[in-house]
Amino acid sequence: MEDIEHIEKEMKLIKADGRRLDGRKADELRPVRIEAGVLRRADGSAYIEWGGNKVLAAVYGPREAHPRHLQDPARALVQCRYNMAPFSVSDRKRPGPDRRSVEISKVISEAFSAVVFKEQFPRTSVDIFIEVLQADAGTRCAGLTAASVALADAGVPMRDLVASCASGKIDGVVCVDLNKEEDNFGDADCPMAIVPRTGEIVLLQMDGHLTYDEFQKAMEMSIGATHRLYELQRDALRRRYSTTLEDILKESPPVPPPPMPESELPPPPEDDFGPEGI
Ligand code: ADP
């Protein structure tokens, strides 16, 4: 244990030029790509690649809540299941729920409960499934950001999308969007999710310690990052639902020309004995 502590203290995460080990600046996000509507069977879906994270999100509902005793006569339930595939991390992860995945599922469903218009769908359930295919720290933020796009893709009425990003402290420097090394050897990690239009915080967690000033800076960085993510989320939805003239032409069958009026038809040949002649 002493050896590990020694290694952790020796690990330099900020280079002499002030950049992080992967070359990012303190307020720089890892590359993010979002795709909406990637699954056929679900009501809504999305896929996100965020640095080394690859996460799928699927949404069903609002549909009748089962088992029935869980139904709320006044509003819909928002339920989430976060799951990490056994092959998502370098050592095989034991399949099935564990304390961590139960906690993440709970905080994500609470975040969405704050934005979904639940009162419009009594006795129903909105079910969100998040499958982490490849993990590299920040999977709850990636999952939540993708699930938000999947909810919009399913047409679930919401006040706004939710975007999520963590920030933390490494080598005493406040940075946004920690990767796996930074998460493991850093001093603090603070995931948060906001409703970009209102600035409301719907998820806030903290692993490690930050001073009041560091926390203020971390919040600022995460909020800045969520605004960038919000643009990417909306872009993904625009790409899914915008139709270009080219798409319309591709989908509609060619229109047959209108029949010619008889008066304009060419006169039949006088001696028509067919292609073979006589
Ligand atoms: P988040 O993924 O939201 O940052 P954590 O801080 O709990 O959540 O996890 C950080 C990272 O640690 C994960 O993204 C993943 O790469 C790794 N990790 C989490 N659980 C396991 C596990 N059971 N086995 C191996 N690696 C794991």
Image (spheres, rainbow, N blue to C red):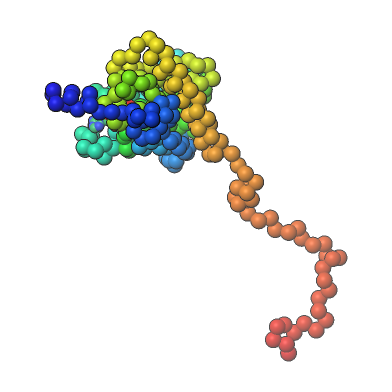
Location of the N terminus by quadrant is top left
- Report the number of numbered marks: 0
Q: Residue at x 66, y 56 (%)?
A: 254
Q: Residue at x 40, y 18 (%)?
A: 218
Q: Nearer the viewer, residue 21 or 36?
A: 21
- Point out residue 175 in the picture as x, y percentages from the top left corner: 38, 23
Q: Is residue 4 visible?
A: yes
- Point out residue 139 in the picture as x, y percentages from the top left corner: 35, 30
Q: Residue at x 36, y 35 (%)?
A: 22
- Point out residue 274 in the picture as x, y percentages from the top left corner: 72, 82
Residue farthest to the bottom, as pictured: 278
Residue farthest to the front, as pictured: 16
Position of residue 181 in the picture relative to residue 163 (left or right): left
Q: Nearer the viewer, residue 19 or 131?
A: 19
- Point out residue 141 in the picture as x, y percentages from the top left corner: 38, 27
Q: Which corner quadrant of the figure contains ligand 1? A: top left
Residue farthest to the right, as pictured: 263
Q: Nearer the viewer, residue 166 or 258?
A: 166
Position of residue 121 in the picture relative to residue 22 (left or right): right
Q: Residue at x 81, y 76 (%)?
A: 268
Is 246 located above or below residue 7 in the figure? below
Quarter of the image holding residue 124? top left
Quarter of the image holding residue 220? top left
Location of the C terminus by quadrant is bottom right
Position of residue 126 in the picture relative to residue 270 (left or right): left
Quarter of the image holding residue 98? top left
Q: Is residue 125 visible?
A: no
Residue farthest to the top, as pictured: 212
